[in-house]
Amino acid sequence: MTGAVSGPVIAFSDIEADFDWRRLWADQQVEAVRAGPGTLRLTLNEGGRLSIPGLDAGGGGSDEGASLPFDRLALRDVAIEVDGPQGDASGVLDINYDVGAGGAGTINLSTDRFLWRGMTLLNAELAADITLSGDGAATFSMKSSGDVLAAGATLRGVMLTIDGAGRSWREAVGGNLDAVAGNALISFDAPQMELRPTQSDSLMQSRQMELLFGETVQQAALAGAFDVIFDEAGVRIFFADQNPSFRLTTPNGASLALSPDSDAPLYTRAGDNETAAFAFALNSAGLQAKGAANIEQRGETWRIVAPLDVEAFVSDALSLDKSRIAIDAASNGNEISADISMESILQKAVIGRLRVTDAPFAGGFKVVADPDGQRLEVASRSDCFTIDRMRGTLEQQDLEARFGGVTLCNNAGPLAVISWMDEPSYRLSGDVSAQSGAVRFAETRAAGRPPVVNFEAVYHPRQNNTSVTGRIAGGAMVLNEALDFSRAAGRFALALDETEMALSAQLDQLRVDQHREESELLMIAPVLAAGNAALTGDNAVFSYELTTLVGRPLGAGEGVHDMRSASGETEFNLGQLTLAPEGLQPDQIFPALKGIIDAAAGGVDGVVRFGWSPEGVTSGADFAFREISFGGPTRAVTRTSGFNGALTLGSLFPVATDGLQTVTVGAVDLDALQLLDGEISFEMPGDDTLHLARGEFPWFGGSLGVYEATANLSGEAAIPLKATNVDLTKIFEYVDIEGLSGEGILSGELPLVFEGGKARIENGVMRSQGPGAVRYRGAASQQAAAAGDDAQIAFDILRDLRYNALEVSVNGALDGRLEFQMKFEGTGDVTVRNQNVANVPVIYRISLDAALLELLRQANLSRDIELQIQRGLSVEE
């Protein structure tokens, strides 16, 4: 007996006993005991075991109840005092018992405060009745009421009723409780349950309450009724037919109800096997869910299978809609593993400053938990799972992203590792890809197909910081509707805390294209970039090297970009580029030059500058050209050679020079027109025109040039070439026809018209500047005598034609046939009928319609002149 006892343990005013002294002597048994009124004091120890001094019930014996020291017992109006570890209870007991015929008993107890098995009973009352039949059957009924103080809750106004029936009560009296069989109806009602969720051993932690009920529940009500069946095979518990549910309700209308799952018992125990099966429905401001659970346990191993339908789940950190979940979990005592299939719409997930919304997803997961190591791993069961779409925002950064067709796959390890030992941490890793995506960081935007990201992320909730490292590959994104990025390959690192974000990246490769509509002109050729970038707060800095798509180096640059204003700038240094017909060509940098310039050779270096903002793009460049030669420009020019000089552009789109620019040109080959060693001063105002302030080439002792002319670069252009002080002697020396010579100075204009990639002279006129002479004493003059007197006279005059005026008009394509109209006015000497006639005034009109190049390069030019003279000779005497 434990606890302090005041007064007698057993005290009766009347006690009677019927006995046979021989039996009493031999077996310590009497036939009958009758007592009462009186007092019986019991002791309840901390383990919940009752004891009566001098009597040890259940000490063993036969099914006849031989363990009791009497065959019959009658107690009337016995006052019971129960001493507990804390507090006491009192009441009245009446018993009429016969080991052969059975009997009946009643007990009534009440207490102001009593501790029993960790619970404190306040203002509690209990009334119980039991009837034992002679055939071994028994019925019992109990009602109790009062308040219960448990570790996590206070239950006020609790009502508990038990009505049952059993058989083989004699087995129980004999100490063989396992042989007892019967059934009972248990009804429980706790209309006011006050929860204390902050205690470590509470019924449910505060955070769990918020997840289930939308708030920290402090009051609730419990009610339920159960049918219990017990026999030698074990115990089975069912929901009672008249009230087939166990329900918890809260003042705000939330409820959790357990109900039968088909015909299966709520609980079964057979030997060391335990099973449970029930359906449930949870409705609250935070969660609407229904489902079922089937649980089986054998010793330390257990398994649970639970399909769930969650209509809605809402909390500060996580919100789900229309979730379908299937759980199959098991434990061997050391480890918990589960297969979870889930289809849901993630409405919201908050991880630090990151908020993910609108993300329907479906997948199967393998979950392994180590309770002792406080560690949980999650992997995709089928290697990957899909997310139809998702939206993410990052507070304080003005950053949002939208993705569609997202696939998240296992990498070398699990998708997630959650640890709550010491400091909680979340580790995520895998491969993520998306069919489409759009990212906005303040005024900076990118859209398209994101690259595949192989990542590893660590989140520490206490410090509220996240770090992410990984690699990217592929993708095709458009940046601010200006640049296309694709074929990415590289590494990155991201650090995120409560206020700042830092991102660094090393790119091994990135294809960069001008973003344009199909009808737009491609200004910049696609290039491959490699380099580094770093983002701190809103500011990005980057450096890079560029090559052509086939790997030819173009140079290196660096720049800055402000994410908030979507503005920035970069400066790119050409790497002393060498142009070669089988190597790098200008159209590989500027595609608009294709068909205009080809087969280029020489060297170029310089600096290209770009600036950008929401208002548009600015550009400029400084170029230095070294002995550049190229076919063109356009088909009108066969080749340009020896191009040298510095060129400063104030804009690349459209092309505009920074004021007047001057370059030198070694040669311009226009088929019939050859220009050598010239100097050109020009400017391009950016309106698709070229202003030629001065372009001059030496030409046959004089000059051929353009002065203050404007040409349209996108269509037909007219360039007025002006010839000045051209030496006729040098022209004849260049033609190099035997016997042909002369002297004189010519000037005039040769208007060049460019159209359809061709050049032609239109209404060109050259005139003599003063008198001169033309002499022809070649073989054709000797052959003229045989042709007749007129031909002889003509060639006699050409032996020394002294002209006062010479005019040549030229029309035709430079690479085709030219039409020449020539007129000479002057005097010459002729022989007529063997007499010499001096200073004969003559006018020669000669028309040539020929391929000029061919005429210049063939000796029969003299024959053509002879024929023209014969047709057009006019002699004035």
Image (cartoon, rainbow, N blue to C red):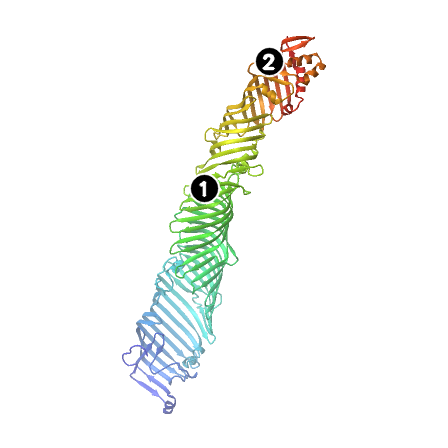
Residue 88 appearing in the image: yes
Residue 427 left/right relative to 782: left
Determine the residue positioned at 64% across, 14% down. Answer: 798
Question: What amino acid does circle 1 point to?
Answer: Glu
Residue at the far bottom: name it. 22
Q: Quadrant of residue 216?
A: bottom left
Q: Position of residue 76 (x, y in %)?
A: 33, 81
* Residue tagged 1: 558
* Residue tagged 2: 803
Front position in the image: 830 or 26: 830
Is 506 placed above or below 620 here?
below
Question: What amino acid does circle 2 point to?
Answer: Tyr
Q: Position of residue 715 (x, y in %)?
A: 54, 29
State which tag comes first along the sequence, 1 or 2: 1
Q: Quadrant of residue 51?
A: bottom left
User: Looking at the rendered structure, which numbered label has been put on residue 830?
Assistant: none
Front position in the image: 120 or 425: 425
Q: Nearer the viewer, mark 1 or mark 2?
A: 2
Find the distance from the CA under tag 1 to the CA under tag 2: 69 Å
User: Callout 2: few (<14), some (14-19), or many (20+) C-alpha neighbours within 10 Å?
Assistant: many
Q: Position of residue 650 (x, y in %)?
A: 46, 33
Quadrant assignment for the C terminus? top right
Q: Position of residue 708 (x, y in %)?
A: 49, 24
Quadrant assignment for the N terminus? bottom left
